[in-house]
Amino acid sequence: MKLVRFTKKGIYCIPGKFYLDPWYPVDYAVISHGHADHAKWGMQHYLCHHHTKPILQHRISADIQVESLAYNEKKKINGVTLSFHPAGHIIGSAQIRLEYKGFVVVFTGDYKTTPDGLTQPYEPVTCHEFITESTFGLPIYKWQTETVLKQSIEDWIASNKMQHKTSVFLGYSLGKSQRIMKLLEGIDAIYVHTAIHNINAAITSSGLKLPKTILLEPDFDKKEIEGKLVILPPALLGSRLLKRIPNAATAICSGWMQIRGNKRWKGVDAGFPVSDHADWNGLLDAVKASKAEKVYVTHGAQAIFAKYLNEIGIPAEEIITAYGEDQLETEGKKTETA
């Protein structure tokens, strides 16, 4: 049975007559999460998880036509039963399960299989066909445990304090910044840029709680934040605002920091492998847990990951999509508007 088709506009559910994370305007878009490469402007109708709804309204427009569902809540669209399931990627992120006449397809969007204490943890969903990302689909990518990661960050902050430096973390405003906030919770006062503050407000408007932060005002008092913790979007690396922060020590937080050479990529002082995506083992575990008869591999190392799956006896096919490999790579080339 052919339930979905890969088109120029995006992934199309044939009997349901709707798209999954389309990259061009369509009548009906089912959205996995709020990142800009998956949730775009111009759709006539949006359907997403409850926690993603205020994020879309903030990032796209308050006037969009958007409907939302809880995890595991079912909705029938033209005979197709649709439901959202935790993806563990960012707050509100969801795998999209489609069922039609007993045939099941799961579209993961982006996902992370290890709990981070903030996002609803990933839950495996069995299906006949599984559409997976492969952002970090190489064996070199194996994430540290949350405990080890947190300790390395705390050690870096302690070293900075001894040198009277202000620890500045660079992370995408939606997803990465909230993850950093959780890792820094309880260490010291956390100051965040306006873009991050506004995203936090959208997230908490749906009833969720986030670690306490302080808005970094444009005319901030240098003495007040000296030696404290600051989170900025990566686009502000090298900006006047960053240069005003007293004795700033900078750290980029991204899965790409798993490769040591990338720490020198943008001329920062440190790099921490904080990722919102599954690592190599996480991807393999998710594919195997799905028990899928066919796997479609999207953005990232799709050719390599699909080839490996075929080699171990799991039929897989590489699919070219418009989704980005990682927000950090492109964010520095444009102004942060979120």
Image (cartoon, rainbow, N blue to C red):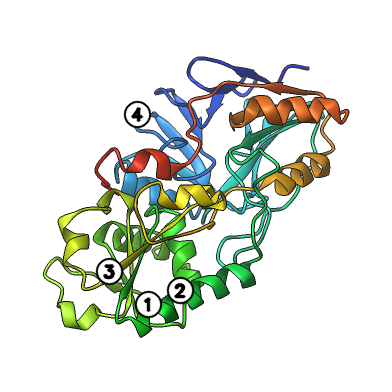
Above-or-below relation of 246 to 32 = below
Sequence-earlier tag: 4 or 1: 4
Q: Which mark is residue 156?
A: 2
Distance between mark 2 and mark 3 Cα atoms? 13 Å
Horizontal relation, residue 293 to residue 45: left or right: right
Residue 231 in percent (x, y) is at: 34, 65
Disc 4 packing (10 Å; few <14; some 14–19; many ≥20): some
Horizontal relation, residue 279 to residue 162: left or right: right
Query: Which residue is labeled 3 in the image?
Result: 248
Query: Which residue is labeled 1 in the image?
Result: 160
Secondary structure type for disc 4? loop
Q: Residue at x 44, y 49 (%)?
A: 53
Q: Amino acid at mark 3?
A: Ala
Disc 3 packing (10 Å; few <14; some 14–19; many ≥20): many
Q: Residue at x 52, y 22 (%)?
A: 10
Above-or-below relation of 12 to 112 = above
* Quarter of the image that includes the N terminus: top right
Secondary structure type for disc 2? helix
